[in-house]
Image: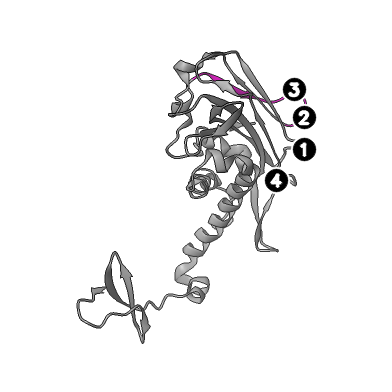
Amino acid sequence: MAKNTGLIQFQGTINNVTGYRRNGKYILSLKSNLNKERILNDEKFQRTRENMQEFAGAAQTAKALRIGLAGLTRILADNSLSTRLTGIIRKDVQNRDTTSDRGVRRVDLASYGSVLKGFNLHRENIFSSLFRAPYSATAPATGKGAKITFAAFEAANVVRAPKGATHFRLVGAAVLVGNRSFDELTNSWTSENGDDGAAGIERSDYLSVMEDIPQTELDVSIAGVTDTDGGAVIVVAGIEFYQQIGTKYYLLRDTNGGTIVGLL
């Protein structure tokens, strides 16, 4: 790679020389002979193809969770959620399959999904810093979903409210995400549960950042789901901050956060 310091500067490709601009400087490099066809067929790239195929399974799993949380991610998450979530599923869930061949290792959330516990939807707004009272998640008495219980607390001591916030809401969500296995007949990843991505979301009332808050329970139901075999219910807890003006509550952006509580 060379830097162009002469009068003639270009961007694009001429013969086998490619020119491009980076950080205000023009860079010249030889055009690579690496292309899609070679990656997909050359024996030297077998490991690359295996990694690409397994990455697709992890990404599909992460997408199912994000779809289930679609009503929350725009409030509680940042734009790195997809990348971070896919990465941890690929590294810490899929890699635990020691029986399948490389390239087709399953995403077994039911067996290994516990590694997701404590995963924050926002990389900077860490839930344990925003909210420090005890809480827990248990299976509901009936149906599928989760019961999230927040112990009584003094908001002024355990809630780290941003400037301008007068109130907050506690949030609970439950998303059924199926395990993923590779179907070699269709050459694609498939969910092992037909209700993949089904979800339920509940919020508390508006709570003052200066008052004592009694024990709060959020009963989150995943409507229409009767069977979670072949997957797991991922439980999320979060907090949203608001500013009250008159009788209206206005959501404060970029101050909220949430975390994966566990799997049921």
Does the CB distance between marks 4 and 1 fall below 8 Å?
no
Residue 141: which numbered mark, if any? 3
Mark 2: amino acid:
Gly
Question: What's the distance in space between the residues labelled 4 and 1, CA to CA?
Answer: 10 Å
Residue 247: x percent and y percent? 61, 26
Does the CB distance between marks 1 and 2 fall below 8 Å?
yes
Mark 4: amino acid:
Asp
Q: State which tag comes first along the sequence, 1 or 3.
A: 3
Q: State which tag comes first along the sequence, 4 or 3.
A: 3
Q: State which tag comes first along the sequence, 4 or 1.
A: 4
Q: Residues within 10 Å of mark 3 (few under 14, many from 20)?
A: few
Question: What's the distance in space between the residues labelled 1 and 3, CA to CA?
Answer: 14 Å
Residue 225: which numbered mark, if any? 1
Residue 196: which numbered mark, if any? 4
Q: Is 139 covered by the magenta stretch?
A: yes
Mark 3: amino acid:
Ala
Question: What's the distance in space between the residues labelled 4 and 3, CA to CA?
Answer: 22 Å
Q: Main secondary structure of the magenta part?
A: loop
Image quadrant containing the C terminus = top right
Task: Please name the residue shown 46% across and 68% down the image.
Answer: 45
Residue 153: x percent and y percent? 53, 14
Q: Residues within 10 Å of mark 1 (few under 14, many from 20)?
A: some
Dot 1: element: loop
Task: Please name the residue shown 51% across and 76% down the image.
Answer: 37
Q: Nearer the viewer, residue 253 or 178?
A: 253
Q: Up-down: is 8 above or below 115?
A: below
